[in-house]
Image (tube, rainbow, N blue to C red):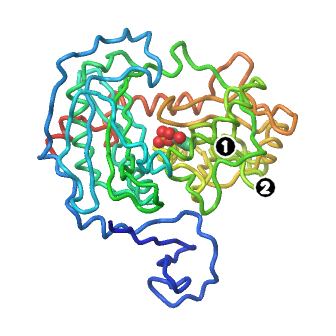
Amino acid sequence: MIAPKLLYRSGSQCFRRSRVPSIPCRSVAKTIFRRSYSLQTDDTSIKSLPGLDPSKLSVTKTITPKELVPSEELVFGRTFTDHMLSIEWTASEGWLAPRITPYQNLSLDPATCVFHYAFECFEGMKAYRTADGSIRLFRPNKNMERLNKSAARIALPTVDGKSFTSLIAQLVQLDSRFIPDSRGYSLYLRPTLIGTQRTLGVGPPGSALLYVIASPVGPYYPTGFKAISLEATDYAVRAWPGGVGDKKLGANYAPCIVPQLQAAKRGFHQNLWLFGEDEYVTEVGTMNLFVALRDKETGKPELVTAPLDGTILEGVTRDSVLALARERMVPKGWVVSERYIRMAELAQASQEGRILEVFGAGTAAVVSPIRKISWKGELVDCGLKKDVEAGEVALQMKSWIEGIQYGDEEHEWSVKIETIINHR
Ligand SMILES: Cc1ncc(COP(=O)(O)O)c(C=O)c1O
């Protein structure tokens, strides 16, 4: 088994982990060791093995096609399509031939390392059926980049993003009958990578399985937006400097459920993760958070989200909101900032009537407007009028992003699956 070499970053310098502490890669270290915010890995040893080869794909079609669930009865993540894509990897042979097979159970030894040490990472992306009948993926390159960062961090192999996307596109094409053609519906895709070595020894897995399952989903808000309320969690943290909060590891999600249940018990839809003594606002449930507020001195509107410091998941929707805001809102006088924002700053802005709106952003809902946040016994108002369920920025972002996803606006972010398959 080839162990990936671990690198860690400190400021602009990167250090190779070795018995000699803190040896800089490029120059002699003058910097005093600081804890890295986001450990990066150098997986060049893994890359020298055979890569993913889409030309080796075998397809075994189901002989018992499933009945389609009526669109209005779809529940997120409960219904799956007829097929799945699987690709095995071993440390000695690299990526083996990809297979599309009928959707089926996995059979794994009880000692398989994924069950004991959480060698698992995943992605969440969607395929959309557009008005012209074509099917498109939204910024799949971003999901591939993130999958590889997650995989490398837990000593699992990385993949060539373009080859993997083309295989996903072939699965989507084969199961395209499951994608309802109404607006708001889509096929949720769940690429999953697990360590499959049968061992209780703690070490890098000598084998892995990358698979993709697909689930038709309906609109997150079938009857229009419903603004949600949050409870700020100050008694637990989701992520921390030097941790893995910026990676999409299954192990990051299970510990978030109890605080979410606590919030629900007190009548809130989700919990808002704060970080540190300064109580920085970070993420909400499985979404990145955006705050639109007016600057105290200048009165200028500002759209703020937390910076990518290693504690924030690098959301594809977050990146899309930021890019669209910079392109289309900055010319209208907005300031767009990736900066720390404290819960106290948010509460003060609310008291002073300067909060315009607050919303979450993620693949599932695109945007999710927030009405109020419970914090230290007070309810912080997030700027929405009583009879209004979404602010202008959230509505505008949803319209821009869905317009691109459903092909109303031709945009490089939205790629037809035939194009992906033909240009791999
Ligand atoms: C913790 C967390 N933050 C943010 C997001 C939003 O990311 P994306 O926009 O890529 O869906 C997700 C979505 O999966 C998430 O799990």
Q: Is residue 16 left or right of residue 226?
A: left
Residue 251 in the image, given as x and y percentages of width and height = 54, 46
Q: Is residue 224 left or right of residue 204?
A: right
Residue 35 in the image, given as x and y percentages of width and height = 63, 71
Separation of disc 2 and disc 1 at Cα?
24 Å
Quarter in which the N terminus is drawn: bottom left
First along the sequence among labels 2 and 1: 2
Q: Quadrant of residue 177?
A: top left
Q: Where does label 1 land, which residue?
A: 301
Q: Quadrant of residue 405?
A: top left
SS under mark 2: loop
Q: Quadrant of residue 186?
A: top left
* Amino acid type assigned to the residue bearing label 1 in the image: Pro
Q: Where does label 2 land, which residue?
A: 278
Q: Is residue 155 left or right of residue 306?
A: left
* Amino acid type assigned to the residue bearing label 2 in the image: Asp
Q: Is residue 23 visible?
A: yes
The residue positioned farthest toward the bottom in the image shown: 28
Badge 1 crowding class, 10 Å Cα cut-off, few under 14, some 14 to 19, many 20 or more, is: many
> Toward the viewer: 75 or 156?
156
Residue at image location 37% in from the left, 43% down from the top: 109
SS under mark 1: strand
Residue at image location 13% in from the left, 38% down from the top: 58
Residue at image location 33% in from the left, 30% down from the top: 105
